[in-house]
Image (cartoon, grey):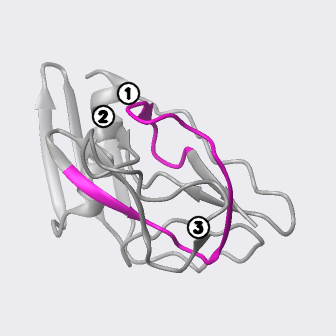
Amino acid sequence: MDIQALKSLIDLFSQAPLQELDVSDGACTLRITRTASHAPLHGAACLPHHPTSAPEVDIAHTPLPAEGPAPAPTGEHTLCAPLYGTLHLAPSPDAPAFVSVGDTLSIGQQVGLIEAMKVFTPIKATCAGRLEAILVEDGQEVEAEQPLMRLS
């Protein structure tokens, strides 16, 4: 099973109301189950919204590298991608962007869409602040937890 497909599957599972998922691909078997929530994280950076229970992954013969987003500098907040997919900064190709650098964002304001497997997931601000920078381009593929925008 290819790592990109695996990441996409895990990201989609985290958004779905499923409790367990089993997938077999040749000699590789993947089981994803939802477990109890971990203790909340505290820090200066805004964190993306996650379901109350995190997926637990058990992969036969396929170890995953441990990765994590770099923390934002004090006083700044980073809005991260909740899943792997293609980022769209406007609702359609001929429409204006959801937000622009310099805009003041409120919590829950839509700032983009991520398309994964023909499903569009709205990306919303997880904290309020002034949009200082858009760190990715429209139409660019993004990874889960990849920084998308910087707020102050």
Residue highlighted by disc 2: 6
Q: In which quarter of the image is the N terminus?
A: top left
Amino acid, disc 1? Thr
Q: Residue 74 carries which label?
A: none
Residue 149 screen position, x and y as percent: 60, 52
Does 53 sit above or below residue 112? below
Q: Percent position (x, y) of residue 68?
A: 63, 47
Q: Does the magenta stretch include residue 17?
A: no
Q: Nearer the viewer, residue 90 or 96?
A: 96
Name which of mark 1 and mark 3 comes first in the sequence. Answer: 3
Query: Residue 18, image x and y in percent?
Result: 15, 65
Q: In which quarter of the image is the C terminus?
A: bottom right
- Mark 1 vs mark 2: give the one in front: 2
> Which residue matches tag 3?
47
Q: Give the range drawn in magenta.
A: 120-146
SS at mark 3?
A: loop
- Mark toward the start of the polypeptide (3 vs 2): 2
Q: Are marks 1 and 2 in contact (CB under 8 Å)?
A: yes
Marks 3 and 2, how far apart at CA: 22 Å
Tell me the element at label 2.
helix
With 120 as the anchor, is 87 left or right in this view? right
Does 138 lie within the magenta span? yes
Q: How far apart are marks 1 and 3 (CA)?
A: 28 Å
Q: Residue 62 carries which label?
A: 1
What is the three-letter code of the residue carrying label 2?
A: Leu
